[in-house]
Image (cartoon, grey):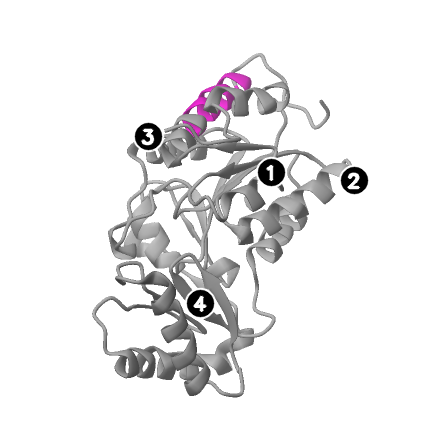
Amino acid sequence: MTVPGAVSWRAALALAAPDLRRRPCLVITDFDGTISRIGLDPWGARPEPLAQRALRRLAATPGVEVVLLSGRTAPDLAGRVRVGGATYLGNHGLEHGFLPRGARAESLVVVADPTHDGFSADAERLAMEVPAAIGEPWLIVERKPPAVTFWFRTAPDIAAAARQVRAVVDRLDPNERFERFPLRRALELRPPGATAKRDAFATLLRERRPALVVLIGDDRSDAEAFAVLRVARDARDLTGLAVAVHTHPDVSPAVAAEADAMLASPRETARFLSGLARGLARAAAPGRRPGRSG
């Protein structure tokens, strides 16, 4: 299927090709809809095998750091991606952990931001009371304290399910203690001011001070991080490439507008990452001098 506005993985990679010798390099990717296809069951998501292999190769390349940045919890994310030598930022950056090469994903040590711990009890209360009030098998609850997400991907009428979930949440949280974030076929509740992907990405830039960044994602929260990258790039602090991935016709154009290129699917992302791994490995070969300037 042809996706309007999408480019081939080779065309996207060509945009980064002149800068592949720059180090340190930071490769950051979302999970759902980016390296994993969106399915009806969020618990059935798996990365594209080629993407998984490419991330492992990238993580083993000198001067390259791989970061997975997702709305999923860090343990859940690591358990699905299973790439050692990578950093896992879960819950939009509220959690972080590094998985050494050769370590089991289940051994990931996660450090959580304690700022919003006071919301965890209410998040759990809503995680129990909302499905009890709705009483439908299509509702899936994703617990990720201090936040919670209610998925309705398999509801027979998505629009009606969205209205029903929102109405129940508003009744059970009348004072709007939690911010509401409508997602594709889901409603996420988060504490006001909780870390978002843009914040987590900005922190990475401050702490890592990369010379080259490749940032990949598919939704509006990723687009906000793309905007942070653009500001840093315009300030000549680094060279970077923002890559959007098409997953939904109602969302992807807005995300693509903030990106340098858009790929047609997670499978194309996998091919892009594989090509990027080869290019960065060649640039790191003996005899080539890495640099910070183009």
Q: Residue at x 56, y 19 (%)?
A: 14
- Element at label 1: loop
The magenta segment: 273-284
According to the picture, the residue beneath numbered tag 2 turns out to be: 235
Question: Which mark identifies residue 50?
Answer: 3
* Mark 4 in CB contact with mark 1 (< 8 angstroms): no
Lateral position of residue 152 relative to residue 205, left or right: left
> Within the magenta stretch, is there residue 233?
no
In the rendered image, residue 283 lying in the magenta stretch gets the answer yes
Q: Which corner quadrant holds the N terminus? A: top left
Q: Amino acid at mark 1?
A: Ala
Task: Count neighbours of disc 1 (C-alpha within 10 A) and say few if under 14, some if 14 to 19, many if 20 or more.
Answer: many
| Amino acid at pointer 3 | Leu
Q: Is residue 182 left or right of residue 41?
A: right
178 relative position to 84: left or right: right
Q: Nearer the viewer, mark 1 or mark 3?
A: 1
Q: Where is residue 67 drawn, in percent x and y?
A: 48, 44
Determine which of the numbered discs, if any, sits on residue 111 in the image. none
**Dot 3: few (<14), some (14–19), or many (≥20) neighbours within 10 Å?**
some
User: Given the image, on which type of amino acid does mark 2 rest?
Assistant: Ala
- Quadrant in the rendering for residue 49: top left
The residue depicted at 32 percent of the width and 84 percent of the height is 129
What residue is at 77 percent from the left and 35 percent from the top?
236
User: How far apart are the alpha carbons under marks 2 and 3?
Assistant: 34 Å
Ranked by sequence position, the earlier of labels 1 and 3 is 3
